[in-house]
Amino acid sequence: MTSPEERPGEQGTDLLAKLFDIRSFTGALFLIFGVIVTIVGLTAGDADIRKSAGLNLALIIGPIMLALGALFIVWLLLRPPELLHGHEVTEEDLPEQLRHQGLEAIPEHPGEPGPEPPPPPRRRPTGH
């Protein structure tokens, strides 16, 4: 395995992959809303508790949301997103549409057009 010194710029890519992973968004949202709901539950009055059949639901749901958010973050840290680098991509990793064209069909730079697809087959008009 290569060390970080042999792959300059890879650490920034790994960090961005973790930041933009769906688990980080989900975990952060659950943590933020869990804190808010827990605070609301701690400051709930008797009238609010009576509205919910005598249960302080915010004080029950808030810590559950906090635990779920922490679970998503721990999952992200234990199983980081897998990054495929250009030299590690195989034919099996390509979408079905690109498998017959090979790796050269993938543009080298984002925004660069790939090879043109073949024209659709012509059909003869049916005469009735």
Image (spheres, grey):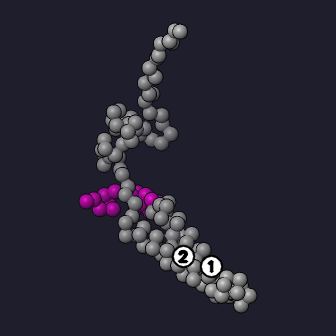
- How far is disc 1 from disc 2 in space, using C-alphas? 9 Å
Q: Nearer the viewer, residue 77 or 122?
A: 122
Residue 37 bears which disc, if any? 1
Compared with residue 7, is residue 112 higher up or lower down, i.e. above or below? Answer: above
Q: Which residue is mark 2?
A: 65
Q: Residue 3 magenta-drawn? A: yes
**Residue type of the residue flagged with mark 2:** Met
Q: Say which residue appears at 63% left-offset and 86% top-offset.
A: 55
- For the magenta stretch, what is the residue range? 1-17
Q: Say which residue appears at 67% left-offset and 82% top-offset.
A: 52
| N-terminal-most mark, 1 or 2 | 1
Compared with residue 47, is residue 107 higher up or lower down, i.e. above or below? Answer: above
Q: Residue 123 magenta-drawn? A: no
**Residue type of the residue flagged with mark 1:** Val
Q: Say which residue appears at 40% left-offset and 57% top-offset.
A: 9
How many residues crowd mark 2 within 10 Å: few (<14), some (14–19), many (20+)? many
Question: Residue 93: image x %, image y %?
Answer: 34, 46
Classify residue 102 by image quadrant.
top left
